[in-house]
Amino acid sequence: MRGKWGAACRSHPTPLHTRPWLGCPVFLLAGGCLVRLCRTFSLVWKEAHPFVQPAWRKCLHIHFYFVDRQLGLIHVKVQTWFPFPLQVHVNGHEWLARRLDRHGIAYRKHDNVFVHVSDFDRAQELADGFASVDWVRVLGRYARQVNPLLRDLLAPMQYYWVTAQAEYSTDVLFRSHQTLAELMPRLLNYGTLYFEAHDVLSFLGRKLNGNFQGDVVTDQLDFGQMPKRLPGRRVKHRMNRNWMKLYNKEGVVLRVETVINDPEEFRIRRRVRRHRRWPHGAPLQSGGSPGAHALRGPDERRAHVTRLHQSRAA
């Protein structure tokens, strides 16, 4: 394994040649290695019989930072011990900016927010296409790039992709800083003082009843009182591992952001046969069935569910 992975541990920018299976130029901006805990397997002997069991061990993780013509800056992390899981971090705003460039739509983007777009309707149509991207094909290219075993020992295999964490935001662009600055304290105070537990649960796909066992927390934070943070305030509604935040960006954008770490908290209409019957509702899943479009269906449903519940909060 050392010979396979050793060449990947570089910390200086390294250009990659265009490969036929990549389909577009990719630039490896930087890379690094880190030893940390991982989920892997161990060989255990019991009564003179060996068997394999799951275990937590320390192993080398390799981090890659790519600049992709279509996705922008992305981060790929690969574990060098079996089963070699991958994590890929993609920014939808970077992807959308490149789509706007290709369609000739003028915009101004600061950090992770658009502060001006010449055609909002067309930009929204392009943004809606993010969930329907063939992510299995796109991410599979990077899997073959960072995991050399997929090119020989594991050549017949492919990764099964799921969405471990998803963030969806709705941005409201104001014409002036002053208007948003005057409105922001009222919105924060209202969201903190007047939203009750059943309101927060409805924002995040649940109903308050006697069977609910979990935490519902609302808090307000002033970033100006924290070191190394830009000034600003936000209110956050959390239910277990999912939450919704309201905050301002760049002084002119009001953002409502939903973070989904546990999609099964949301119920959707999905045909799943259980106990010889078809239930009316089933949990939202992290991924789909294995195949060419394992992520497409769940991501589109996740986007639809998020838009629905953000509209309730508004």
Image (cartoon, rainbow, N blue to C red):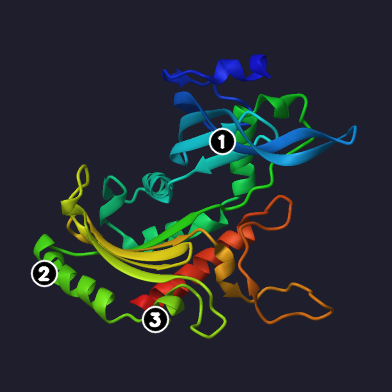
Mark 3: secondary structure: helix
Q: Which residue is mark 1?
A: 37
Are dots 3 and 1 in contact, CB under 8 Å?
A: no
Q: Position of residue 279 (x, y in %)?
A: 72, 80
Task: From the viewer's perspective, tell me whether residue 212 is left or right of residue 105.
Answer: right
Residue at image mark 2: 182
Secondary structure state at the residue bearing disc 1: strand
Who's the residue at 71% across and 26% down the image? 149
Quadrant housing the C terminus:
bottom left
Amino acid bearing label 2: Glu
Disc 1 crowd rating (10 Å Cα; few below 14, some 14-19, many 20+) is few
Residue 312: quadrant of the picture = bottom left
* Residue type at numbered disc 3: Asp
Determine whether the residue tagged by mark 2 lies in a helix, strand or loop: helix
Residue at the limit of the structure toward the bottom, as seen here: 209
Give the labeled residue for mark 3: 199
Q: Which amino acid, by three-letter code, is at mark 1?
A: Leu
- Left or right for 86, reference 218: right
**Residue 112 versus residue 87: which sits nearer the camera?**
87
